[in-house]
Amino acid sequence: MSEGEAPGALSGLRVLDLTRVLAGPFCTMMLGDMGAEVLKVEAAKGDDTRAWGPPWAGTESAYYLGVNRNKRSTVMDPTLPEGREALAALIRGADVLVENFRTGTLARWGFDEPWFAEHAPRLVRCSVTGYGTTGPKATLPGYDFILQAESGLMSICGEPEGEPMKYGVAIVDLATGMFATIAILGALKARERTGQGQQVEASLFDSSLALLANVASNHLVSGQDARRFGNGHPNIVPYRTYPAADRSVAVAVGNDAQFVRFAALLGHPEWSADPRFLRNADRVGNRDAIDALVADAMAGRPADHWLSLLRESGIPCGGVNSVAQALADPQAEARDTVLEVAHPGVPEGSYRTLGFPFRMAGTPLAVRRPPPLLGEHTAGPGWEAADGRP
């Protein structure tokens, strides 16, 4: 922490990051954003995502830069005796260890339950796995795309008569990283009470099913399988995108009172008296009819016309933006959603990246250091070599 910088909520916490790719690094980045000292342990070739370009910012891939700020990097090989010795020293000095190896890897290196109980009893250990540590698939590697397919998430994404589609980002990886962060924070709170660390885990399998949320609940209650609704909603109508004259508009009519106002705004107050559309349950049963009527009514005017009227009437709506448009939105600027970060490995001297998805008034989040170069902080086995503290 630099002089004059406010301490983060996790200032003083030491996190040993043995993860790579996305779910684990996203978790440890959030811990680092909150002030934790994060030491990223990499193999000689580095995190896989260092090679996932283009695009590049100098020698660094945009993918790697996006999930590895507020960390230091050290290189070691735990398959060798000297690497295991160095790793053991780091573990003894850590508060949190996060790893996403295949189940049993740490134990094969000698870091089994008895070792942790003797040498690091206060350590919070988080395993980020593909399928969890139990069950018939526990030994399989996990990939976001595969779990999107297996979990049913793809089956509910896409046009009703089209092919199942994956999401545009690795949503399962990101959710797993968030669940891992939540579990770690809970274990740290429990450590305050018990004085003991514990093992926690987050898996892509569990996360992908959790993301089904209300869709899973619909199936479990009704016994009916879920299906695709395109941009529609399984339980609320009208709640989808509608094409205006120049671009599409997303409309979310959340209750019957809003529908009355919505129908009048479109010039069709009679819709709210139509038995097919009186209540949300009626509209769900007649979604094709009402969706067609709304689409026809909105087609003749530009999106900004409808957005203005809808917002004035208190009806949730938004234009369908590209990523570039979304990041350039005045609201994004007001919220510091995009940050400029100095980086010695970038020819321009800095790069642009996403800011923080949450805020903490008393212990603000900060970018204290850019994503590290590979092995940039390799200086010895102890934490004192990584952060200069005794």
Image (cartoon, rainbow, N blue to C red):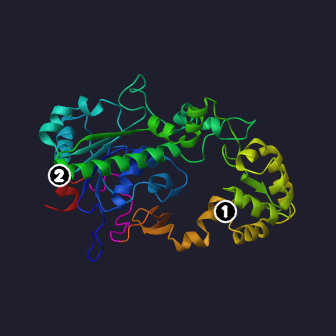
Magenta extent? 362-377
**SS at circle 1:** loop
Q: Is residue 251 above or below residue 229?
A: below
Relative placement, left or right, of 373 versus 226 is: left
Q: Is residue 106 above or below residue 307?
A: above
Residue 204 on the magenta segment: no
Cα distance, mark 1 to mark 2?
53 Å
Q: Is residue 151 above or below residue 347?
A: above
Amino acid on which disc 1 is placed:
Pro
Q: Earlier in the sequence, mark 1 or mark 2?
A: 1
- Foreground pick, 341 / 131: 131
Q: Main secondary structure of the magenta part?
A: loop
Mark linked to residue 316: 1
Relative image position of residue 302 (x, y in whole percent): 81, 66
- Foreground pick, 352 / 117: 117
- Which quarter of the picture shows residue 69? bottom left
Relative image position of residue 220 (x, y in whole percent): 56, 32
Identify the residue position indicated by label 2 in the image: 382
- Which quarter of the picture shows residue 342? bottom left
Relative placement, left or right, of 279 versus 363 is: right
The crowd level at tag 2 (other Cα within 10 Å; few <14, some 14-19, many 20+) is many
At horizontal 75% and vertical 41% (from top left) the residue drawn is: 285
Question: Decide: marks 1, 2 in contact (CB < 8 A)?
Answer: no
Relative placement, left or right, of 183 versus 229 is: left
Residue 21 visible? The answer is no
Viewer-side label of 1, 2:
1
Q: Quadrant of the N terminus?
A: bottom left
Q: Is residue 262 above or below residue 382?
A: below
